[in-house]
Amino acid sequence: MSRRIPRGAQRLVLPLSALVLLTGCGDDGMGAKPEPPSETPALWNPCDALTTDFIEKELGATTTKYAGKPAAPECRFAPAEDSGEPALTANYQLFAGTLDEFFDQMGQTEDADVRQPEVPGADAARIVVAAEKDQLYVTGFVQNGPLFEVVNVVDPAPYDEARIVRGTVATLAALSAHADEKDAGTPASSGATD
């Protein structure tokens, strides 16, 4: 009496038998494969360049610094709840274009208050100021090679617009200097050396 394998099962038997044969191959004493890392370290954390003392000096805010973890960085300087003081966040992105191209992707309105401060060591910088009745919003952008860092400051009324703008520019300068110091804005493939 012969057993017949159903047609659908035949398609599975051949690949499975080939898999069984292949699993016996390649045991050259190489040992077990290493485990992949559980966390991939981040390239950059803007908080490495900033301190609570810096934020207090430049923005007039007593804050707590939140820098996240190496594999999940974040950069926030938060004042005490209901203090009326400004808060700052910073992040980064790698981008192969120019700040003009990066900035165009943000989709600013025609009437936006956009300024171009001079930031030593940076390829380019921009800030956008939105002075509303209840709050001041300032967003700064600084480019060092392919590294683009973005700073957001929110200050509830009553606010000192001139001080917050100066503090945002100082923050961009600190981030740019740190990027230059760490060669973070130098593409690895450029072959640039000191």
Image (spheres, rainbow, N blue to C red):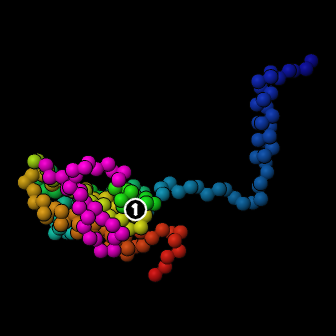
Residue range in magenta is: 104-132
Q: Quadrant of the N terminus?
A: top right
**Relative to 9, is 78 above or below?**
below
Which kind of residue does numbered mark 1 sit on? Thr
Could you say which quadrant of the image residue 141 lies in? bottom left
User: Is 150 a magenta residue?
Assistant: no
- Can you identify the residue that label 1 sits on? 98
Residue shown at 76% from the left, 31% from the top? 12
**Relative to 159, is 188 above or below?**
below
Disc 1 secondary structure class? loop
Q: Position of residue 31 (x, y in %)?
A: 69, 58
Q: Residue furthest left?
A: 158
Relative to 40, is 140 on the left or the right? left
Q: Position of residue 82 (x, y in %)?
A: 11, 50
Q: Residue furthest bottom?
A: 194
Residue shown at 53% from the left, 69% from the top? 189
**Relative to 146, is 177 above or below?**
below
54 or 172, which lies in front?
A: 172
Q: Position of residue 151 (x, y in %)?
A: 28, 59
User: Is 123 a magenta residue?
Assistant: yes
Badge 1: residue crowd in 10 Å (few <14, some 14–19, many ≥20)? some
Residue shown at 37% from the left, 56% from the top? 102
Residue shown at 56% from the left, 55% from the top? 36
Q: How many marks?
A: 1
Q: Residue furthest right?
A: 1
8 or 188, which lies in front?
A: 188
